[in-house]
Amino acid sequence: MLYELSNVKRVFGDRTVLDIEHLEFEARKIYALIGPNGAGKSTLLNHLSFLDQPSSGEIAFKSRPVVYERSALTGLRRQVVLVDQNPIMFSGTVWKNISYGLRVRGVARAERRPRIEQALERVGMTEFARRNVHGLSGGEVKRVALARALVLEPEVLMCDEPTAGVDNEHQEIILKILSHANSVKNTTVIFSTHYLSQSRQLADRTILLQRGVMARHMEENMFHTRLVKRDQTLMCLLADKHPVLYTDQHAQGRENQRVRVHIDPKQIFLTRTGTGGTGSKIPGRVKSISSEKGKVRAVVDIGIDLQVLTDEEQFLAEPFQVLAHVDVLILQSGIRIMT
């Protein structure tokens, strides 16, 4: 395991800004940190890049506890790079900015040149090499900052809101740069964002933070609904009209209560209307279909919007089109009442 966090807290005065009971990051994966302003995303990135020390708890990197002493931290910081939301550029050219970290680390001039050229190519800014950074747009500055990080060939690349404040074109370019770093260079990528769509597009795992605490589930397929009893069987009533079998014994005695229910999008299956199969089926209509890291995500209208996540191979075996009418089957194992 690349990172392991255990009971990590960061406290400023009387305010706890981060409280992580347990969290792990695997090498060569992409992780997205999602949450509103003040959720603890930047604080967590600072901890993972060894720029800040927890008030309590332990962080292990490559199975070794992090020791917060200068010599130990120097070695750790050379393996990770954090690109700030508003990166500061040094005066001078793009080339000078990208070469800075290599010079600080004592990389020989003969080695610096090909690495800088490669970094410029990776962010699509080869023709900007001799341009002054102070004439660049916001999106171009972000790309230079990424090149400045990538030229160091880090094991872990962290980005705090890498697409904030840039146009749609640059957002797509930046996301492709992060994807390339992971898929071609095997770099672990951890980035924060406000956009769930970006995490779906890029991340192997999405971590939702709320007030410094990890949410147990992403806020998708989270519904306020009612438990009802039909023929002595407990059911979840979705969209106030679709009963779905629910067998958790802990919910007994809660019939007719309003509850918060989470439905795992991977535990939902779609079939063509009228085809065979067992279980309670709900009629629906496909609203959208998108590709997501080897998966296919569909949004199905059953009176409420239901997120469905399936393997690409399974989807291609029986593909659906937008606006198609389908039957929705929700497995009992995918339904959970949230406390």
Image: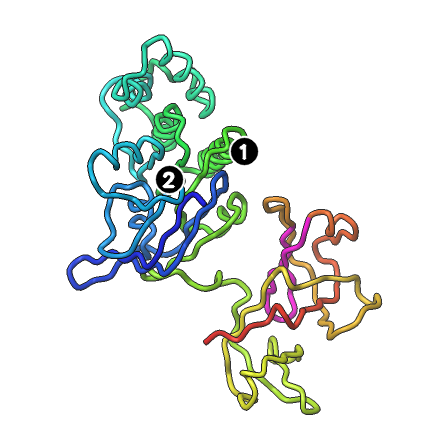
Work out whether residue 332 or residue 201 is closer to the camera in this orientation and state it. Answer: 332
Q: Amino acid at mark 1?
A: Ser
- In the rendering, at what x and y percent does residue 91 appear? 22, 21
Is 302 inside the magenta-drawn segment? yes
Labels 2 and 1: the sequence-earlier one: 2
Write down the quadrant of residue 329 in the picture: bottom right
How many numbered dots are placed on residues in this image? 2
Work out whether residue 57 or residue 167 is closer to the camera in this orientation and state it. Answer: 57
Comparing labels 2 and 1, the label whose residue is closer to the camera: 1
What whole-number distance in Å separates the C-alpha atoms at marks 2 and 1? Answer: 17 Å
Circle 1 Cα neighbour tier, 10 Å, few/some/many (<14 / 14–19 / ≥20)? few
- What stretch of residues is rendered in magenta? 296-311
**Looking at the picture, does residue 298 appear above or below residue 88?**
below
Q: Which mark is residue 159?
A: 2
- In the rendering, at what x and y percent does residue 36 appear? 36, 56
Residue at image position (49%, 48%) is 199
Work out whether residue 121 or residue 132 is closer to the camera in this orientation and state it. Answer: 121
Quarter of the picture containing the C terminus is bottom left
Quarter of the picture containing the N terminus is top left
**Looking at the picture, does residue 161 appear above or below residue 12?**
above
Q: Amino acid at mark 2?
A: Cys
Circle 2 Cα neighbour tier, 10 Å, few/some/many (<14 / 14–19 / ≥20)? many
Task: Name the secondary structure under disc 2.
Answer: strand
